[in-house]
Amino acid sequence: MTDADKRRFMGMALNLARRGRGHVSPNPMVGAVIVRDGKIIGRGRHALYGGPHAEVAAIADAGNCRSADIFVNLEPCSHYGKTPPCVEAVIDAGIKRVYVGMTDPNPLVAGEGTARLRGAGVYVESGILEEKCLDLNRGFVKYITTGLPLVTWKAAASLDGRIALSGGQSKWITSEASRRCVQTIRSGRDAVMVGSGTVLADDPRLDVRIPGLARPARIVVDSMAVTPPEARLFDGKGKVILAITGNAPAARVEALRDKGAWVIEAGNGRRVDLSEMLRMLPGLGVVSVLLEGGSVLATAMLAQGLIDDAFIFVAPKLLGGDGLPLLGPLGVDKIDSTPQLEQVTWRRIGDDILCHGYVKARHE
């Protein structure tokens, strides 16, 4: 089998894995393709949290797998969880070659799956389309290694770093093409997050309006539960998570629960404890978050080191010094101490520019 064939079949496994987005978190998205003599005989994916894993589904689809190859974007598990170990299913099926995209970072696996397969005489090759496999499950990797979800910040600004006019008008700074790109970015995360100020000012739906794309949950950081029960978020078409403090008025909280909100309490001060809130999200099936909205929440998250990467859309407009800034004060007094992006890419979208990068760890 050529390297090109291996990449092609792994790409198919990745495409299957992506279909689990929004359905399997906090588990990883995994797809599997079984091949014999260059022909696909079975396909499978992890379709639902707690359900059969991709390898098991693909084996069931194939039937007879003797002497076949399996391509899977994540190392097969070797431990008992909600389902039996996938390595046992692969060995029992008589599969002779296993091609893996990336090693599972879960300490319960972390190379053990590969070792058990090789111990049973199965050929294993790892690292096929590894970067693409990692990119698909960055949220899972962050969660399994830190207990926190991956947080991506999305912002749209003018050339002079303003996100709205002084009166709050921001529709539309960026182009329709950029806004369509945002829809795709949203669909690639488990949840979209805003602060209560954004809900009160804009009453956003925070949905995905492109047919066929996954619909993320909506999170509102709302210390005092001021989100109106009639907000368009409560459309009955997806999970709405409300993060409050212990000081939120009980009557308002109950009214929002009646509208279907999943309420989590993080902290007892004037503001939501953001780190505590993030640690609660994987339990609600959220291991990747797209942070949107205004500057207050973004500034707090950035200052606390809780943002992993950023998509910043820059439009060729100038709003002036009386416009609302992209960020508030960060409390830094040295250039070397300011947040920086690395692994930066730039992309032109119509007349706009999209900058993406990963937030560099502070004080390196």
Image (tube, rainbow, N blue to C red):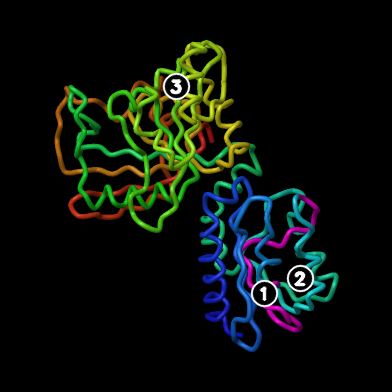
Based on the picture, tell me whether residue 28 belongs to the magenta stretch. Answer: no
Residue 192 lies, in percent from the top left, at 43, 39
Q: Please name the amino acid that badge 2 sits on.
A: Val
How far separated are the C-alphas under marks 2 and 3?
47 Å
Q: Determine whether the residue tagged by mark 3 lies in a helix, strand or loop.
A: loop
The residue lying toward the viewer, choosing from 186 and 50, is 50
Contact between marks 2 and 3 (CB within 8 A): the answer is: no
Q: Please name the amino acid that badge 1 sits on.
A: Ile
Q: What mark, if any, has residue 112 been given in the picture?
A: none
How far separated are the C-alphas under marks 1 and 2?
9 Å
Q: Determine whether the residue tagged by mark 1 lies in a helix, strand or loop.
A: strand
The residue lying toward the viewer, choosing from 287 and 2, is 287
Residue at position x 75%, y 84% in the image: 67
* Direction front: furthest residue: 258
Q: What mark, if any, has residue 222 been given in the picture?
A: 3
Residue at position x 56%, y 61% in the image: 17
Q: What mark, if any, has residue 70 been given in the picture?
A: 1
Q: Which residues are magenta?
A: 60-81
Q: Quadrant of residue 216?
A: top left
Q: Image height check: is 212 above or below 192?
A: below
Q: Image height check: is 60 above or below 239?
A: below
- The residue singled out by tag 2 in the image is 90
- 301 relative position to 125: left or right: left
Quarter of the image with the C terminus is: top right
Residue 326 lies, in percent from the top left, at 29, 30
- 144 relative position to 167: left or right: right
**Among numbered discs 1 and 2, the one appearing first in the sequence:** 1
**Among numbered discs 3 and 1, the one appearing first in the sequence:** 1
